[in-house]
Amino acid sequence: MDLAQLSATETTGLVKTGQLSIVESITASLDRVAMGNPLINAVCTVNHRALEQAAQAEARLRSGQAARPLEGVPFVAKDNLLTSGLLTTFGSLLYRDSVPAETSLSVQRMLDAGAILIGKSNLPEFAHDINSVNALFGLTRNPVDLNVTAGGSSGGTAAAVAGGLTPVGLGTDLGGSIRIPSSFCGICGLRPSAGRIPVHPSEFAWDTLVAHVHGPMTRTVPDLGLLLSVLAGPDDRDPMSLPASPADYVAAASGNHDLLGRRGGLLMNLMDLVAIDAEVERLVSQAASDLSDLGCVLDNARLDASHVKPAVNGTRAFGMVARYAEIYRNSGEVLSAALKSQVGGAMGVDLLALADSERHRSMFYHAVARLLEHFDFLVCPTVAVPAMRLDEPLPRSVGGHPISSFYDVFYACYAFSLTGLPSVSVPCGFTSAGLPVGLQIIGRRHRDDNLLEVASCYARHHPEHFRSPGISTSIANDASLATRGVTIG
């Protein structure tokens, strides 16, 4: 049995029937970290108590206690999620020795369900860049191709899952930080409805404006449903958490249903807001056709996306100032250049501009809500381009069209973060260079279950897009890996 190939769903099944011990599961995952992590640098801190905790869980089962939903499943948690007794750095020199007394609620729910934390996964400083690189741990690479980015900011989790170190992991998502690296690494990533997975502790309990959410990253859609069934549910410590839902997320993600009669809307480039790489457009168009073949009525949709950029600019500025202005003033000399630039620019945004930004966000939400009166779900590229090379400058054009900022290619993710609607990225094929491309599916308000039904039905009929995990070691010694040993500014 190749344990690297097992999903979380398969692992729990084998543990429950006694065909796999928890210690075997966790030992195998730690061995894969030891072998693979030097190449991809996905795990920045290993949980030194993982085997001890596995033995305790094994003893619990031997005592006759029932197996829990995630019994024996190894996972990683992004290094901005608190872990009591285990280093949590946020990828910042300011927290290089920080060992919190608390554990983030999402991590705790995984542990309470029987999962074993293998370690913390790498990220850019304070989770605010597209490449998962920082001055403490260096650069995370994409296991599909070590020359290209794993994305950010949950790039370490995506690389660990895609590389077969663990079957599942936890990420966080503001403007696409779960979905973008999931697309680049060829895995599944869910940004749930805002409030579906409660967030605690949090400096900003109401998370005013666009919500930061925690969510699962997996190799299979059924694992998304399994993890969401454990992670979802209200908690009074999070005043934004949603009431309990009657939805069965495991059943929704099983693929055991059809899509007959459902209506989908295709938004290829958000009405020219985003320039699209030709291969991404081809693969997403094929995915839309494949959904139609499964019984959906899928039509081109029209959406006024002119509100997206001004909505993003102001609401993002608010969050940057709220979270980092004091650090910027008092400790700016140790911050990364990327973060300093973002915070410095945000501090020039005034309240009038912020109010206007929130007005634009409201108008965009209502435009999407009107669209979803006619469609059950929307689809578009997760990212307008495949993963970028690490040793080359960011492209100045996409699909033959010059772009003012390369970061515009990520607007398809941020646009739907603005709305609070659930969205998921699933693999939909590979470019001629072998790089994964993600299909983003957006659901109706609070219908995470319907979203999983669409994603799982697509996945069941197109398993060819969901490749086995592993690290592309054939280019491990490629001289073009110029960023190895990079000095982070």
Image (cartoon, grey):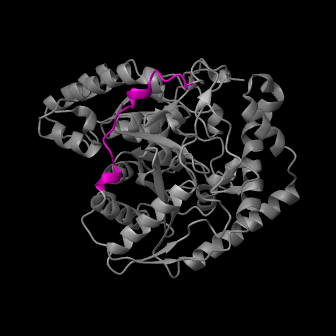
* Residue 104 placement (x, y as % from top left): 50, 37
Residue 252 image-quadrant placement: bottom left
The N terminus: image quadrant = top left
48 on left or right of 87: left
The C terminus: image quadrant = top right
Please name the residue shown 41% across and 64% down the image. 287
* Residue 94 placement (x, y as % from top left): 68, 22
Please name the residue shown 61% across and 20% down the image. 136
Residue 202 image-quadrant placement: top right
159 on left or right of 365: left
* Residue 274 placement (x, y as % from top left): 65, 60
Q: Which residue is at the front of the view, 191 or 392?
A: 392
Q: Main secondary structure of the magenta part?
A: loop
Magenta run includes residue 475: yes
The reply to whether residue 103 is visible in this rendering is no
Magenta run includes residue 36: no
Q: Which residue is at the front of the view, 178 or 288?
A: 288
Q: Which residue is at the front of the view, 98 or 253?
A: 253
* Residue 91 placement (x, y as % from top left): 61, 28
What stretch of residues is rendered in magenta? Answer: 463-481
Q: How many marks?
A: 0
454 on left or right of 95: left
Please name the residue shown 46% across and 35% down the image. 145
The reply to whether residue 58 is visible in this rendering is yes
Residue 2 image-quadrant placement: top left
Against 12, is 241 above or below?
below
